[in-house]
Image (cartoon, helix red, strand yellow):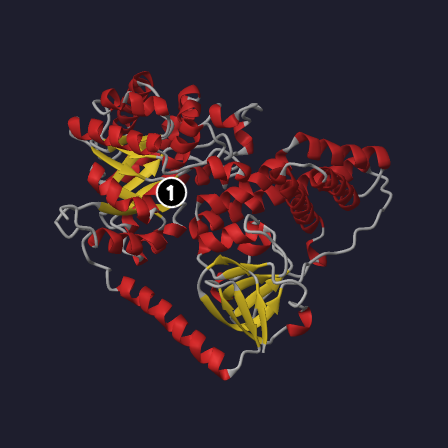
Amino acid sequence: MLIIKSESVFSGIAIGPLRFFKKDLAAVSHITVSNTEEEARRFESARALAIEQIGELYKKALNEAGEKAAALFEVHQMMLDDPDFYESVISMIREKRTNAEYAVSMVAKNLSEVFSSMDDDYMKERAADILDISQRVQKMLNPERYQPFTMTVPSIVAADDLAPSETVQLDRKKILGFVMSKGSSNSHMSILARSMGIPAIIGAGDELSEDLEGTLAILDGSTGTVYIDPDVVTIEVMQRKQRAARQNIERLETLKGQPNVTVDGQKIDVFANVLDLSGIDAALKNDAGGIGLFRSEFIYMESQDYPTEEEQFAVYKQAAEQMGGRKVIIRTLDIGADKQAPYFDLPQEENPALGLRAIRICLTRPEIFKTQLRALYRASAFGNISIMLPMIISLKEIKEIRHIVEEVKIELKHVKAIFNEDVEIGIMLETPASIIISDELAKVVDFFSIGTNDLTQYTLAIDRQNRQLEQFCDTHHPAILKMIEMATIAAHNAGIWCGICGELAGDLSLTETFLRIGIDELSVSAGMVLPLREKIRSIDLKA
């Protein structure tokens, strides 16, 4: 038996054969081309396909692993959209008359070396990202040359390290655990493993070699240990430890159908955040009381052009029907900043997180907004739909939106469409401005939902995607908790409810705090619904 001590990334026990990840790299040769414009078009087409594919990976990661893990793919999309990368490849093709594959490879190599030479750790990590997006574009240029990595049986995946696109495309049903010979606790694989709840360790070193392919191994994520070709006693000990973990999952399953109520009788709604229709099944499977956040922007991001009213209506109607009367809160389009749809042709901005995004697009392009609202109101006839508006900062915005809503209702009545006149309209509180005037906003809307991800970012002046700033990003900062309390008091004084749909909603260390504040609803990833219910049912606020 070989025992390798390393660093834990995520706890849990995995028992199974080692399956070494083979990088599907193909050699890139320099070829002189005669038609440089055709070669440039090949690159542009491959780049567009790569961006589209990364968008799909973003959705998959968001559904399975949450916003923090999915943000890794937003970085990759931004890199592929970066003018320096694009123009450097096009220039090399035209000036050197070289094939697209070689141009992409050389530009990526040069940029990667620049990033690697920087003193800043965050920027150094971008070197791997550059190589990853380069590889993706090359796959789009020559898909027949690349053989995807597959697993025929459930296995522990072993590698030097994994890029995010490699990790998220693996068949999750067959991943027992991850063991990396290199890597870091801040690597993409580590972040994804934690988010997906898969046992993982890093830094196993050179002893983890490919000649161990297929060998039985045990990964103990709680201690950062790998047992390769374990003896009988070790197997028995680890199997007992694994059974205890499974019993915990089974215990959570018994909570299905149980109320979200504290020992002393305080109730709270537990809803699920979903990306699109594919997330509805997981929400129902985990017994969510409703959908607290349906991210409609992905209807736009998946489309090559503005989605029509009928296309949107079909999605919203199906969501309402699938939830069978349970509340479905659909957020209006939240395009902008790190979520882009090329056909919107949004301007380049120095600070996109502070720029033209979300409701600001809706109010400056009202016809796009009205198309979505018509679809939402028509779908309201088929279930319990509520509308949620992102990035609201003023009463003026609400007044403009109400006017547009009334126009939409008149249009629908004119064509004799059936819809619910009294659809709830609520807002996301994501900025200090909205919190400070929450007492005024509460008088003109039907509910609040606090988006703690952006609220934390804007309050602490910290880019939440910059991992170098993690040590400064205190999500439990007193200012954040005070703001949540302010919003809740304002909501209740106005007779409306207040929920949380950001990642803090699933932070079990804050559940009791939220209950004491008086939060009415917590909306979390589907997999967190039952653990959150268990936590709520264990709390006695009178103790």
Please state the horizontal and vertical placement of residue 294, each as a whole percent of the image. Answer: 36, 42
- Mark 1 surroundings: few (<14), some (14-19) or many (≥20) residues within 10 A: some
| Residue at image location 53% in from the left, 53% down from the top | 190
Please state the horizontal and vertical placement of residue 479, each as a whole percent of the image. Answer: 34, 30
- Can you say whether 76 is above or below 64 in the image? above
Asked whether residue 383 appears in the rendered view, the answer is no
Residue extending furthest toward the bottom: 232
Q: Quadrant of the N terminus?
A: bottom right
> Circle 1 is placed at which residue position?
503
- Seen in the image, is 365 located left or right of residue 120? left
- Can you say whether 23 is above or below 306 in the image? below
Please state the horizontal and vertical placement of residue 476, each as a whole percent of the image. Answer: 36, 38
Asked whether residue 302 appears in the rendered view, the answer is yes
What's the amino acid at mark 1?
A: Glu
Q: Secondary structure at mark 1?
A: helix
Quadrant housing residue 84: top right
